[in-house]
Image (tube, rainbow, N blue to C red):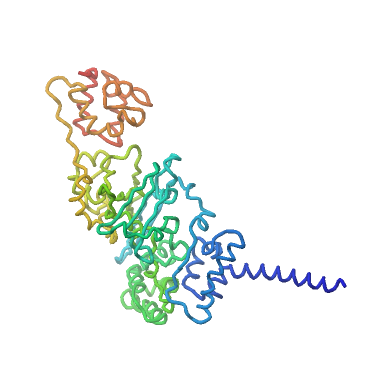
Amino acid sequence: MILPYAILGVLTLLLLVGGAYTWDYTNSPKFCGTTCHTMPPQNVTYLVSPHANVYCTECHIGRSFLGTQVARKTEDVYEIYAMLFHQYEFPIRASRTRPARETCEKCHQPEAFVNDSLSVITHFGNDLQNTSETIYLILKTGGGAKREGLGRGIHWHIVNKILYYTTNPLSQDIPYVRVYNDDGTTTEYTTAGFDPKSIDEDKLKEMDCLTCHNRVSHNFEPPAESVDSAMTRGLIDPNIPEIHEKAVMILSASYASRDEAVEAITALADYYKNSHGAYYSESADKVQAAIQVIQDIYDHTVFTDQKVDWMTYPNDLGHIDSPGCFRCHDGKHLNANEQAIRLECNLCHSIPIVSTPQNFVTRLEISSGPEPASHRDPLWIGTHYIAYSLPNAACTNCHITTDAGGISNTSFCSNSACHGTVFNYIGLDALSLRKTLPQAATPAPTPTPAPATGPITFDATIKAIFAAHCTGCHNATAPTAGLNLTSYAGMMNGGNNGPVIIPGDGRNSLLVKIQSAQHFANLASDELSLVKQWLEAGAPEK
């Protein structure tokens, strides 16, 4: 009598164990990437992504109660049908994704991103020597809300609620943005000609991690980026003449099949035999190694049968190869007061600094203290070279302006990462907005008045000098370092480091010592000379 129950128990146990293993296998990357979807493009990029140890279902279904996961998985019955009857439409696109709160944020907490990070990007030129340059910038990852004492940086977009409307299946065109403010109000931004009343509220999307990190596990890098990465890591020897230009050119071409592409890549050896014979005879192994890497890059970024290459899926993390950040921060989205969404490079990262192998030391400028009023202009990036006649006092207070507008990288204002780069998606062509937004262009500052005739006093001379250079930071409202230079009493009180002047002793006054070295804002030499004379005369007020 016991045997039938024992058999039933064993069968039940086998069914439960087998079911558990089956469930786990159908959630595994091997099943998703090969057995089920037969989609090598997504699987190949997944295996080299930061999420290569994360199950596909954790992103595409989300972490939740088992019953909920089963219910969500039944939504993909069509995928089984499409696989069995070859009904896939290429290129494959994810038609349903779970909110980031149910996927990304099960591991990553946006509120925890409060520190900045250094980004180092190396590019190689298309010259004979593959001349390299490295771009350094500080990413202001930041996050949080103002009520938490944060409210800055890139991850501000996640902690603070933002809704947007897109007219493009890949969310590449966003004509409407709604920002929910801390005080309970909302601010709407729209592009010219778009009527917000036409929006179906159900079609609004809430900005989350995937709005920008849309290719975090399946990124198909453009040829130049792939080759730069391979050369930076030494997979392709940077000493091979012209290898950057040739590799990018071959990878950028269109081929009818993989065999045709492999033939073109292999033919690179013949080019080096004919054009760089001496080098090839000594370093044929390096050229052949480079050819293999170029072929590997092709195999990771181009899939002819699935109609996939590096242009199929735009990567919204950035703003060079696709609109990315410039979908909203493009100077074209205006609110009811005709103010644009802020458009400054240093809103999300520091101004990029370009370094070459000849530069042993690279100076990366990091802003500190109160933000200058000119930088708070929503269209500053587009108007600074018009609103200001460079170089002038407003810029030279903080920056070296040699070769302003050039690409020599000899100063802050001759930055090749800015002036030498074409930004295809930014709204700089919308600078006609200057006509409708005259308040956006900050007027050039008033020059420091010449000293009045007679004795040099605080009221007659020194106060005007401080007003032109210092009181933007050292004021009564928010005195940086506790120092208020807007009044004689404030100056005499000194700051957090004690007195800043010693009447009768200009050389040993802290104010003179600081201004004699590099400072956030430096006085001109003739102005500093007047300050010294005033101090030597006893620093009279009137």
Reply above or below: 327 against 10: above
Can residue 395 be seen by looking at this rendering? yes
Q: Is residue 83 left or right of residue 150?
A: right
Q: Residue at x 44, y 73 (%)?
A: 92
Query: Where does the image place residue 83, in percent across and percent down from the top left?
Result: 52, 78
Query: Residue at the location (38% across, 45% down)?
Result: 181
How many marks are shown on the rendered structure?
A: 0
Q: Quick one: quadrant of the N terminus?
A: bottom right
Residue 172 in which image quadrant: bottom left
Locate residue 189, reporting x and y percent.
31, 52
Quadrant in the picture for the C terminus: top left
Q: Is residue 147 above or below residue 89?
A: above
Residue 323 vertical placement versus 440 (above, below): below
Q: Position of residue 139 (x, y in %)?
A: 39, 50
Q: Nearer the viewer, residue 381 or 392?
A: 381
Taking depth in this image into account, of 105 and 333 the one nearest to the observer is 333
Q: Relative to 121, does residue 248 appear above or below in the rendering?
A: below
Q: Describe residue 499's horizontal placement relative to residue 395 as left or right.
A: right
In percent of width and height, residue 178 lies at: 36, 52
Give the residue drawn at x 66%, y 67%.
20
**Relative to 33, 364 lies left or right:** left
Residue 291 seen by the camera = no
- The residue sitting at the left extreme is 453
Residue 246 placement: quadrant? bottom left
- Residue shown at 22%/58% (left/top)? 429
